[in-house]
Image: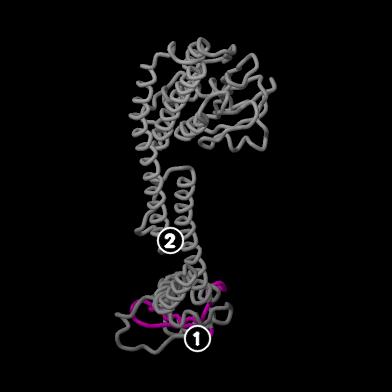
Amino acid sequence: MLLVRFTLKAILFIIVFFQIYPWLSSVATQHFSTSLKKDVALDYLAYVYALDAARPSLSETQWYDLLEKISVNTNLTIKPLATIDGVASAPKIKVENIHDEQLQTVTAKILDKELIQFSALGVDENAEFILTLIQFILPLTLIILSFFVYTLWLQYRLSLLEKASQRLANGDLSSRVDTGFKALGRVNQTFNHMAEKLELMFTRQRNLLRAISHELKTPLFRLQLKLEFIELDELPVGTKQSIKNLFKDCDEMESLIFEILEFSKYELLATPADLSNVNLSELIENQVQTLSQHCKKSISFSCEVPIYISASTIGIQRVINNLVFNADRYATQHIYVSLSQSDRLTHLIVEDDGVGIPEEKRALIFQPFYRLDESRSKETGGVGLGLAIVQEILHQHQASIMVESSQWGGARFVIQFTD
């Protein structure tokens, strides 16, 4: 459909162009002829002024002899014209048939009394080429130029659509394109309709998830309250263990509900609401010191110079918390946190000395509720939303995160912030 519209527009343009081309050609030719006549008249004007000065001192015989001598001894032929009425009102020089050297005539007025006619000196040899250019090459050039400009305009509108598609692919569901002058046929309307459907679908999904999570809080609280009133000392050993397991399940469900609500909150935001110029090195150092009191493994932090970026303090703290607690579950002895800056890029690295993450599963760990097998299983804690929340927060900061193998044997999470 788009190709058909483009073809119809091209045909319409060609028809309109050839309708106005005769007028354009006439105007251009007339302008060129006027300019050329002025140039030719100036070429003859020197002769006219010289003859004007000589004529008063010459008799009729001497005058005709002078004109004949000029015609014989030069390439310029001059002949007198019969004296006619209205010489005084005639122009000083009149050029006719300017484009044809054979038919070209130049008539000059001498002392407002008589007329003489010059043979053609000839116009510039490029004049014929210029006329050909005006009549044939110029229209073709205009057509090519018009198609080139239209192609650039089409490319510009496509680039706007491409940028909007990229924003949509990056999670900005509010991305829309212009449906007015810059629209690309009905493609823009179709794109906006698709984006609206996607945004509505994801909004409903998030709202449903948040509603379910909120609704689960009340029965969970009642269950926890009833468990608190149970006298464990009066129960058999097997029953005591079952009650303790119920407490653990309730704690896990409470943690799951909290993480779901947190994930939904960050997923709803396109950009952080509390952006400010943050001393990232100081923020991370303080956070690491706080986390070291709650982690089972030792933590070290290294940063050579103070580094400032535009970020959300709460968001960055949540990123550090999730990555460090994640590393604490799987590290053997130590967690390493480092911060550096180079080439307008800021790198935050969190790594551990645990078992690491298989390469084929590294792209999956940022998916909500995804769990790894073996040592990184449900037995180690967590609900599978920590890394998904980290990724959502970093997307809001236009930052990227990747996971690779650490030199210490475990996982190495590399975060890259751009200025």
What kind of residue is marked 2? Val
Residue 45 visible to an observer of this rendering: no
Residue 24 visible to an observer of this rendering: yes
What kind of residue is marked 1? Leu
In the displayed structure, would residue 131 be above or below residue 199? Answer: below
Q: Is residue 117 magenta?
A: yes
Q: Is residue 190 magenta?
A: no
Image coordinates of residue 212 in percent, x first then y, are 37, 37
Image coordinates of residue 222 in percent, x first then y, are 34, 25
In the displayed structure, would residue 348 be above or below residue 292? Answer: below
Foreground pick, 358 / 223: 223
Dot 2 corresponds to which residue? 187
Quadrant assignment, res 111: bottom left
User: Few, some or many C-alpha atoms within 10 Å of disc 2 (few <14, some 14-19, many ≥20)?
Assistant: some
User: Which SS class for mark 1?
Assistant: loop
Image coordinates of residue 396 in percent, x first then y, are 44, 34
Is 405 displayed left or right of 14 in the figure? right
Dot 1 corresponds to which residue? 103
**Which residue is rendered at x = 36% and y = 59% of the image?**
181
In the displayed structure, would residue 386 be above or below residue 77? Answer: above
Region in magenta: 102-126
**Which residue is rendered at x = 53% and y = 73% of the image?**
137
User: Which SS class for mark 2?
Assistant: helix
Give me the disc on residue 358.
none
Quadrant assignment, res 355: top right
**Which residue is rendered at x = 47% and y = 70% of the image?**
1
Image coordinates of residue 352 in percent, x first then y, are 63, 20
